């Protein structure tokens, strides 16, 4: 097979997935994916971004051949994952959301066992070094921390040295050090030409890793683009001409900002003493806030102004109400 | 949709090692299956609870049947009547209860799904489980035979060939049944069902205690159960060196029905 550099590693078109019949729906089918289309390229990180239950995992599990699609077409490295054999599976690495590693196994024998399934695997010793698995090599999977489990699951997905790597919520349970390590490796693999498809509900992951983002909501595509393109996504009609900005600052907890800022600028206190004022902030608004601080002798411990984040775009698109 | 490819080719200058080419071939099918079989065998043998079920309980039952008069009047000696049924019980322990429970929990933890995305695949996974059942069963036969011979067991030498063939067939039927349970209900339920059935079929299913020693109501049923068919077939082989065609037929039917049902209804996640 000729592998043109332009041919995408994964292309999904009009994917529909029904599950059921469900007793909670009087025996009816539930449509969890209703028309997702996406393309993932070699040498890029493609992110599926969406809230929990948006259909991201179902979408990539259909692409992995773990779930059978109801309608639509999927081409993974030019093959249909539903009918593909060991040849295709050897070129695709999968890290499942729940890890999928046997609880009683120990890391090194497990990786060696999986490596045996490939003709020419990534040397296990090298993977162990890269992902810092030595530190817990004598611990059984069930006793590993969340971050250790994720690193082992990533090693297990990479041991076949795949062309396409699927990562389902890769940063779940990662401590900051593991996150640094895993994100660094993902970037390096991308630069080596691996096509990486990941799902995440964390805007930060998408913003840091993704070359191209598909926002999935309620089982369908709602927006797509590079992170930069998405940040320029048109504001909702009621936002007017001005740009949404967020003023972040830390001060004494429990301050009451009633009357300080105009309507349309929301002040929230996410953690005690950690405030975010979001809205179409004007220079006059900033002056009003600082004047209010000055009058009360408040000196913020930290202060920053941020343009719209991917999170804002996401919330603008998929709505701010809790579902 | 237009796709910005500006992010391509952003490899850092002077990257350290020449990276290996991405993508490769799977190991040959036979090697994948053998590896999985070995891995599952070692896992089963390392599991204390499974070892109790696979070896300790059958040996205890064998001793129990030789020191009590339960089997008196059926064959030449108590041990001669007991051992064929104990071997059948071993097949049920490993293929049905042991393998069913481990598959149920592997399914819960996503192990089946993960392994099915590797070159091993679903078929290789099942083949590996069957191999592991046969490997553990072989060890059980060796241990039980060794202990039984020291207790004075005198099998009909003509019986070995039909008995071993029947044992493999019985293991196939019980593996299919174990997978059917493991693939359709929660692992906790699999644990309860396969353990309960092990006790019920072990005591009343015609496996170690011949059908004619059971209450009349059960006698007509047990010969159609996989336990009764395997137990009777094993006794016919080792007590008289004969092949029991009804046993073979019943076990073949159970294998086909349970295998078909498991293929149809097994849920991987």
Image: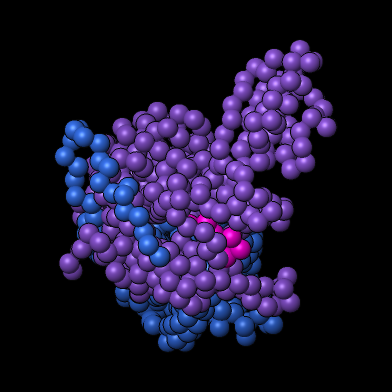
Chain colours: A purple, B blue
* Residue in front for this viewpoint, A204 or A154: A204
Residue B28 image position (x, y, % from top left): 22, 62
Looking at the image, the residue that sits furthest to the top is: A297
Q: Main secondary structure of the magenta part?
A: strand
Report which quarter residue A93 is drawn in. bottom left
* Residue in front for this viewpoint, A102 or B78: A102
A295 on left or right of B254: right
Give the residue displayed 64% in from the left and 76% down from the top.
Answer: A29
Report which quarter residue B108 is drawn in. bottom right
**The C terminus of chain A: image quadrant:** bottom right
**The N terminus of chain A: image quadrant:** bottom left
- Is A225 contained in the magenta span? no
Q: Quick check: A177 above or below A235? A: above
Q: Is residue A265 visible?
A: yes
Residue A161 image position (x, y, % from top left): 27, 50
Question: Number of callouts in the render?
Answer: 0
Give the residue displayed 67% in from the left and 73% down from the top.
Answer: A22
Q: Quick check: B65 above or below B159? A: above
Residue B269 image position (x, y, % from top left): 53, 63
Give the residue displayed 45% in from the left and 35% down from the top.
Answer: A179
Give the residue displayed 67% in from the left and 40% down from the top.
Answer: A279
Q: Is residue B105 visible?
A: no
Residue A11 image position (x, y, % from top left): 37, 66
* Residue in front for this viewpoint, A87 or B171: A87
Span of residues in magenta: A214-219
């Amino acid at each position: 097979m000729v592998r043109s550099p332009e041919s995408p590693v994964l292309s999904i078109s009009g994917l529909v997935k029904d599950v059921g019949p469900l007793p909670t729906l009087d025996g009816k089918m539930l449509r969890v994916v209703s028309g997702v289309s996406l393309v993932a390229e070699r040498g890029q990180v493609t992110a599926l971004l969406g809230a929990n239950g948006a259909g991201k995992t179902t979408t990539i599990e259909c692409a992995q051949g773990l779930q059978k699609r109801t309608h639509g077409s999927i081409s993974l490295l030019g093959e249909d994952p539903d009918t593909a054999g060991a040849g295709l599976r050897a070129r695709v690495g999968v890290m499942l959301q729940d890890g999928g590693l046997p609880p009683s196994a120990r890391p090194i024998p497990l990786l060696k066992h999986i490596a045996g399934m490939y003709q020419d695997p990534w040397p296990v010793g090298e993977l162990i070094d890269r992902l810092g698995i030595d530190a817990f090599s004598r611990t059984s999977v069930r006793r590993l921390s969340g971050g250790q489990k994720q690193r082992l699951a990533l090693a297990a997905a990479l041991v076949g040295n795949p062309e396409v790597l699927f990562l389902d919520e890769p940063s779940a349970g990662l401590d900051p050090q593991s996150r640094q390590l895993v994100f660094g490796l993902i970037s390096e693999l991308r630069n080596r030409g691996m096509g990486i498809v990941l799902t995440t509900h964390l805007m930060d992951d998408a913003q840091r890793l993704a070359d191209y983002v598909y926002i999935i909501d309620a089982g369908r595509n709602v927006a797509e683009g590079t992170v930069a393109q998405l940040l320029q996504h048109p504001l909702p009609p009621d936002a007017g001409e001005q740009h949404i900005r967020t003023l972040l600052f830390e001060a004494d907890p429990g301050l009451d900002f009633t009357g300080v800022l105009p309507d349309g600028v929301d002040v929230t206190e996410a953690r005690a003493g950690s405030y975010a004022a979001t809205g179409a902030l004007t220079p006059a608004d900033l002056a009003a806030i600082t004047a209010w601080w000055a009058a009360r002798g408040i000196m913020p411990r930290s202060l920053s102004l941020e343009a719209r984040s991917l999170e804002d775009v996401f919330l603008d698109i998929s709505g701010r109400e809790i579902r | 949709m237009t796709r910005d490819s500006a992010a391509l080719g952003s490899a850092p200058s002077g990257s350290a090692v020449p990276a290996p080419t991405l993508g490769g071939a799977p190991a040959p099918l036979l090697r994948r299956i053998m590896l999985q079989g070995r891995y599952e065998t070692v896992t089963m043998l390392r599991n204390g609870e499974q070892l109790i079920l696979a070896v300790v309980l059958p040996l205890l039952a064998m001793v129990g049947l030789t020191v009590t008069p339960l089997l008196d009047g059926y064959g030449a000696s108590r041990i001669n009547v007991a051992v064929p049924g104990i071997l059948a019980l071993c097949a049920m322990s490993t293929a049905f209860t042991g393998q069913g429970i481990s598959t149920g929990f592997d399914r819960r933890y996503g192990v089946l799904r993960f392994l099915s995305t590797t070159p091993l695949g679903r078929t290789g996974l099942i083949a590996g489980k069957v191999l592991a059942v046969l490997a553990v069963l072989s060890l059980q036969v060796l241990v039980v035979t060794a202990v039984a011979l020291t207790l004075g067991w005198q099998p009909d030498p003509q019986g070995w060939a039909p008995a071993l063939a029947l044992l493999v067939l019985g293991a196939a039927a019980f593996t299919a049944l174990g997978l059917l349970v493991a693939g359709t209900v929660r692992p906790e339920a699999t644990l309860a069902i396969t353990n309960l059935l092990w006790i019920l079929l072990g005591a009343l299913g015609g496996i170690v205690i011949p059908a004619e020693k059971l209450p009349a109501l059960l006698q007509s049923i047990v010969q159609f159960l996989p336990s009764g068919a395997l137990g009777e077939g094993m006794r016919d082989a080792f007590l008289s060196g004969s092949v029991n065609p009804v046993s073979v037929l019943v076990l073949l039917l159970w294998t086909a029905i349970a295998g078909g049902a498991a293929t149809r209804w097994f849920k991987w996640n």
